[in-house]
Amino acid sequence: MSKDGNEAVQGGMNRRKLIGGLGAAAAAVPVGGALLMNRSQQASAQGDLSEAANAIISERQLTPDDVTAALETFMPAGTMDEFLMFSSSGHAGQVFVIGVPSMRVYRTIAVYTPEPWQGYGFSDETKAVLAGGNINGKSITHGDTHHVALSETDGVYDGQFAFINEKTHGRMAVIDLKDFNTKQIVKNPLLVSEHGGAFVTPNTEYILEADQYPTPLGWEYAPLSEYKEKYRGLVVLWKFDREAGRIVPEQSFGIETPPYAHDLADAGKGASAGWAFWNSFNTEMATGGVMDGNPPLEIGASQRDMDYLHVINYQRAAEVVAEGKAEQMNGFNVIRMDVAVAEGLMYLVPEPKSPHGVDITPNGEFMVISGKLDPHVTIFSFAKIQAAIAAGATEFDDYGVPILDFQSCLETQIELGLGPLHTQFDDKGFAYTSLFLDSAVARWSVGGADNPDGWQLIEKVPVHYNVGHIAVAGGDTAQPDGKFLVALNKWSVDRFPPVGPLLPQNLQLLDIREGKTMRPLTDMPMGMGEPHYAQIIRTDKIDAWFAYPQDGDKVGWDAIAGDFHPHGVQAGQEKVERDGTTVTVTGTVWRSRITPDILEVNEGDTVVWHITNIEMAKDTTHGFVLGGQDISLSLEPGETETVTFVADTPGVYPYYCTEFCSALHIEMAGYFLVKPAE
Ligand code: RUQ
Ligand code: CUA
């Protein structure tokens, strides 16, 4: 649509054309008859929509672009989105699952944060998951989630697992997409903070992570005056066991680096499989100290024109660990810097200063670096990097790490605009880069052997406002799906009704289909957290359970252990047992009864209560809350969970089901009585 003063006139003309087209192609929905017709009958029924549609269009003053955007994003009742977006939530500590193109939120997955609707962090089973992320024995109930990584097979999302990093404390989590539950949180024993994760290798053998702000490795103390000598960076490869569905810390390893702050990463694929790439900033090794008259960190860290891309041969690094050349630090395998250099595992390539994202092209041949303070994307060739490694470096940093020649590794640079951050790819040979300062998304063509005329800026479209990451369907895999792009905008400013000073983020959906100019379709306010990165997978790749497994009469699944719960029982097998001052309850829930429905204990007793939802029908979840004990469970079909607490305060406490599960849901309740001690 033209953006000049004729827009209204043109809009009016196109509007009439559009309505004519709608009337001919689409169907009438006769009032009254609609309920009796199926979708295809409705679609083939003759009629004319134009009058009704025209009335709405003129009343709401919609442009043709508005109307087509609405038609492209509207999901008729009962139909499914083609894609699902898995998005981080920033410091809300969760993952959001959002439909594309409808931009409807379908699930929150609690990861680092207790979440009562899911009962996450309230049962013994899920408390144990959260405890995996304890810091020096202290329980932490928030996390700063940044980058979701869906598991991959041959470089393509396989729909089995998702991983998400946690920046504040250097943690990593595993979500199983069979039930969309968090199964494991691991704490990196050497990192205090991190950022360059989670990114998976092409077959999810490893999950990448790296420090953000260097510290002495392993939680040691050293004054900032000893930064260069004692502080270090660390890049980490967490080993993932797909069969077990767990990260295996003992088989994971880190590689010590100079104390450069690491930013985002990507794993090589195709041509560059077996290698991993991390950006860095603050190669100046500035430490701030404004109150002592030193330059602030952001100034000190931006003195030099170049920082370093870290090029890591992780396949060889795994062999080096197997050869026994790693050291144990806090029980974690670490390849020390001198070993990494001697074994040819680590190289530095100068890159324009303070870069943010590094993104590998779908064929794995090129590394795209966005320079934050540089208006270009810088593109390195993996083949040229390999040639430079083979030729041998002539320069080394203060720590003896070889520095490859910038020009020898460079494929090209493309000027895109201000504040380039992150790049994604589509299935047509285009790349998309977010421009934070320009509040725009740039589309450019990827060059190389297949497209010698490539490496060109094609177009830019404004987004609102201050775009961080962008996500294209399959956009960081070996086989992108294209079609849609979501701009994860940090600011929404004037886009939504006022809801107080804390405004939602704005997730903006763009149409990037072939032959079309990139076109914003819809705005989605995100008022539950700050999504950083997101990945978009085809919905048909997700094969989630509707109920936990049942085996004949055997029921009661432990969702965390991934097996039948030792205390799962069928109806009629419920029991209450006392052993000294411990009362063990083995109970059930089903529509519309909680068994036992009366439980009396003595003041000071410890209560261990196992509850099994014996129902298997879709959507028959029951909740369980008991006042005064901070208990809120979500018992999904076929699941068993446990709560353990001390009945420390005499009184009478009703317990009840929190999911409106049946007509007699409110009757689904019982009494917990605590008899006072003599
Ligand atoms: S960050 S807005 Cu991925 Cu943590 Cu770039
Ligand atoms: Cu079960 Cu309400």
Image (cartoon, rainbow, N blue to C red):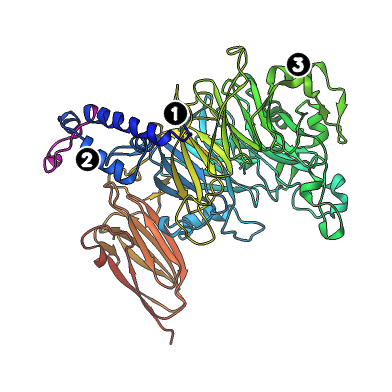
Q: CA distance from mark 2 to mark 3?
A: 66 Å
User: Residue 124: percent from the left, percent from the top?
Assistant: 47, 59
Residue 483 numbered mark, or none? 1
Residue 283, compared with residue 90, is above or below; it is above
Q: Earlier in the sequence, mark 2 or mark 3?
A: 2
The residue beneath circle 3 is 387
Residue 52 numbered mark, or none? 2
The residue that appears at 83% across and 27% down in the rendered structure is 402
Bin the neighbour count of mark 3 within 10 Å (Cα to Cα): few under 14, some 14-19, many 20 and up. Answer: some
Toward which corner of the image does residue 267 lie, by quadrant?
Answer: top right
Toward which corner of the image does residue 379 lie, by quadrant?
Answer: top right
Left or right of 262 in this view: 118: left
Q: Secondary structure at mark 2?
A: helix
Identity, as a three-letter code, of the amino acid under mark 3: Ala
Residue 596 numbered mark, or none? none
- Which of 455 and 243 lies nearest the eye of the viewer? 455
In front: label 1 or label 2: 2
Toward which corner of the image does residue 321 lie, by quadrant?
Answer: top right
Q: Earlier in the sequence, mark 1 or mark 2?
A: 2
Q: Earlier in the sequence, mark 1 or mark 3?
A: 3
Magenta stretch, residue numbers: 25-39
In front: label 1 or label 3: 1
Q: Secondary structure at mark 3?
A: helix
| Ligand 2 position by quadrant | bottom left
The residue that appears at 30% across and 28% down in the rendered structure is 17
Q: Is residue 27 magenta?
A: yes
* Labels 2 & 3 near each other (Cβ < 8 A): no
Left or right of 399 in this view: 64: left
Identity, as a three-letter code, of the amino acid under mark 2: Ala
Bin the neighbour count of mark 1 within 10 Å (Cα to Cα): few under 14, some 14-19, many 20 and up. Answer: some
Q: CA distance from mark 1 to mark 3?
A: 36 Å
